[in-house]
Image (tube, rainbow, N blue to C red):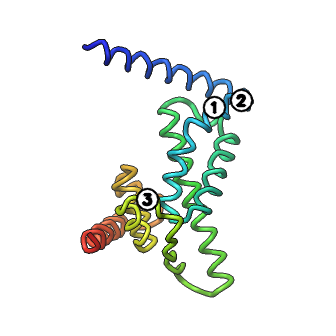
Amino acid sequence: MSAQSSVIDAKQVFAEKQELEWILQAKQGDRQAFNHLYQLHIGRVYALCYRMLSSADQAEDVAQEVFVQVWLKMDNFRGDAKFSTWLHSVATNTVLTHIRKQKNWLQKVFSIEEQPQAEQAGNEISDLSDMDKMILRLPEKARLVFVLFAVEGYRHEEIATMLNMAVGSSKSHYHRARNLLKEWL
């Protein structure tokens, strides 16, 4: 083991201990400790929300809602998994709840069955890579399945449960997303 890798390992151990301290303090109501957790994880949570929602405004709102939910549910974190894993699960469920609520509202107001595809927002996505731009163009269900499977690493069985669909449908949406992305490339 080189000296450089042992320094990196020591830094990681320190960071994990610091995060654990913040978690314990936040569970006791310490807002400053929770703010540290927020600062540590907001980037990844926002990125997940943005990929799933394809809207910067909605992603920002939902990312904030994720942390409201985390604050309210801190006692539910038992430490069986890493905090980031638990946070990721809360974020994914919050995004899916947001999508369901939005669809229900759109269906009531406009009497439609499917939400219209997101318009291409040129300046909102100008700083994203070409692949991210293409992912945002995917139809909603294909985009959700693709992000959850290819980007976030969920299994089709988990995705099917989260999105209330059959495993075969999850695989089909993923296949469709991959084919569209290949075509666009």
Location of the N terminus by quadrant is: top left
Q: Secondary structure at mark 2?
A: helix
- Taking depth in this image into account, of 44 and 74 the one nearest to the observer is 44
Q: Residue at x 52, y 67 (%)?
A: 123
**Lower sequence index among marks 2 and 3:** 2
Please determine whether, in this image, residue 68 is positioned above or below residue 134: above
Give the residue type at disc 3.
Leu
- Taking depth in this image into account, of 54 and 79 the one nearest to the observer is 54
Location of the C terminus by quadrant is: bottom left
Please determine whether, in this image, residue 20 is positioned above or below residue 130: above
- Taking depth in this image into account, of 84 and 80 the one nearest to the observer is 84
The residue where tag 1 is placed is 36
Q: Position of residue 137 (x, y in %)?
A: 42, 72
Q: Position of residue 175 (x, y in %)?
A: 28, 68
Please determine whether, in this image, residue 108 is positioned above or below residue 51: below
**Lower sequence index among marks 1 and 3:** 1
Q: Residues within 10 Å of mark 3 (few under 14, many from 20)?
A: few
Asked if the residue at tag 2 contacts the one at tag 1, i.e. Cβ–Cβ closer than 8 Å, the answer is yes
- Taking depth in this image into account, of 61 and 161 the one nearest to the observer is 61
Left or right: residue 38 versus residue 162 is: right
Q: Residues within 10 Å of mark 1 (few under 14, many from 20)?
A: some
Q: CA distance from mark 1 to mark 3?
A: 27 Å
The residue where tag 3 is placed is 128
